[in-house]
Image: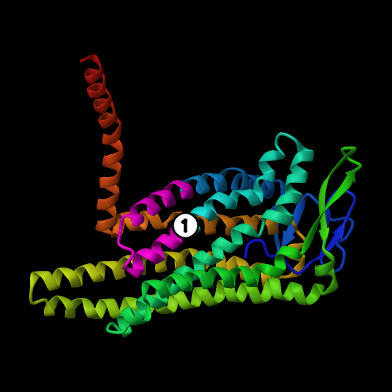
Amino acid sequence: MTSTMGPVNYITSGREMSFQPNVSTANSSTDHSQVTLTGYIFDEKLIAQFDFFFNCFFLHFLSLIGVVTNILNIFVLWRHSFSETTTIWLLSMSVTDLITSVVHPLRRINCIVDQFDPVAGLTSRAVSVVYLVNIPDIFISASMFITTAIAVERLVAVLLPLKVSQIFTPSRVIWTIALLYAYTVIMLGPTWFFLSYIIIFDPIYNVTRGGYMLSQFYASDYENLTKYATGSLTQLFTSVTFITIVTCSVILSIKLTISRSKTLAKMTSWKSGSRQVRDMKVVKMLLTVCLVNAGISIPTVTIQFFLLYSNLSILSAGKFHYLLRSIVSILYQVNADVNFFIYVTVSTKFAKTLRTMLQCFRLRPSFNIAKADVHGMEMEE
């Protein structure tokens, strides 16, 4: 996950907790304004500018889009029948993505505060790192697990069409979503206690401010907890979901292509044919959601494993490390935004409901004005 800390030692200094890699110290003659990475030179100032753009502007802009689009998703899906498991899956995903869009910017809110008050920025950074940084991971992970569950359900629907309604009932889907949330919270639970918030005196600004340090819990079993955070969670939350979604999507694509011609050939009546076409459109929409999720996950998984298995000296670069983590955050937020555009493009039912709902909102002000005029005429009489 994006907030998972890398395999580095933490050293608390007077100003801020710094990273000390488990490698030999760099030569004192090294130009610290640049970071060397496998033969390439990265200007830290340029990296800092990119990081500022991603965290202080682009992430918040995408989060705002996510809030608007997922609210629209919830309003539209709420009008559909909850007897269909598809509606429950998509509604739960929209709620999860909405919360992600609301809380995601909180982990990097300090970069905005820092522009107005550097001391308050350092304190807000400590608060976000200790208390807020893991909150988005719960909902990002839950969204990934829900997408994985949708892919599995659609695969079962194709392989066992007569039994899928018995296996995935609305009540079971709701329980599955609740269990996925519980599983996510339990698995991420230890990472909430890695750092402790402290009050320190900053000799540079000559003030007392908030800071953070390794918690006693983390320091007591540092190596195993680091392996769990950087290894086990990455495998379970990133690799397993990605492989499952891709596998199910590939099988679904093949089955959908084969069954399309057979379905069209077996249509004996307009009623049965329209039902089969509608079912295929639902499968196509859910398959598109899974494929887009998998496509966005490819660079995310690549960056996650790059940070996990690359040379530790790369992590000591600091700014470059955080830049890659910022890119991961951006990709997760894009994943939370994109479903609305898929629904509008692929689902005619969703698009029709959305148009009807927007038309009602447009007509409501004029209706209220007309109602007020009538009421005024009654009062005059």
The residue at the far top in this view is 380
Question: What is the span of residues highlighted in magenta in the rendered image?
Answer: 66-95
| Residue topped by disc 1 | 95
Displayed quadrant of residue 152: bottom left
Residue drawn at x 63%, y 62% as measured from the top left: 2
Query: Does residue 319 appear in this view?
Result: no
Secondary structure state at the residue bearing disc 1: helix
- Front residue of 366 and 310: 366
Q: Position of residue 157 (x, y in %)?
A: 32, 79
Residue drawn at x 58%, y 52% as measured from the top left: 104
- Front residue of 310 and 36: 310
Residue drawn at x 74%, y 59% as measured from the top left: 36
| Quadrant where the N terminus is found in the figure | bottom right
Majority SS type along the magenta span:
helix
| Quadrant where the C terminus is found in the figure | top left
Q: Amino acid at mark 1?
A: Val
Q: Position of residue 377 (x, y in %)?
A: 22, 18
> Is residue 72 on the magenta stretch?
yes
Q: Position of residue 24 (x, y in %)?
A: 86, 68
> Is residue 195 on the magenta stretch?
no
- Front residue of 287 and 26: 287
Displayed quadrant of residue 147: bottom left
Query: Does residue 147 appear in this view?
Result: yes
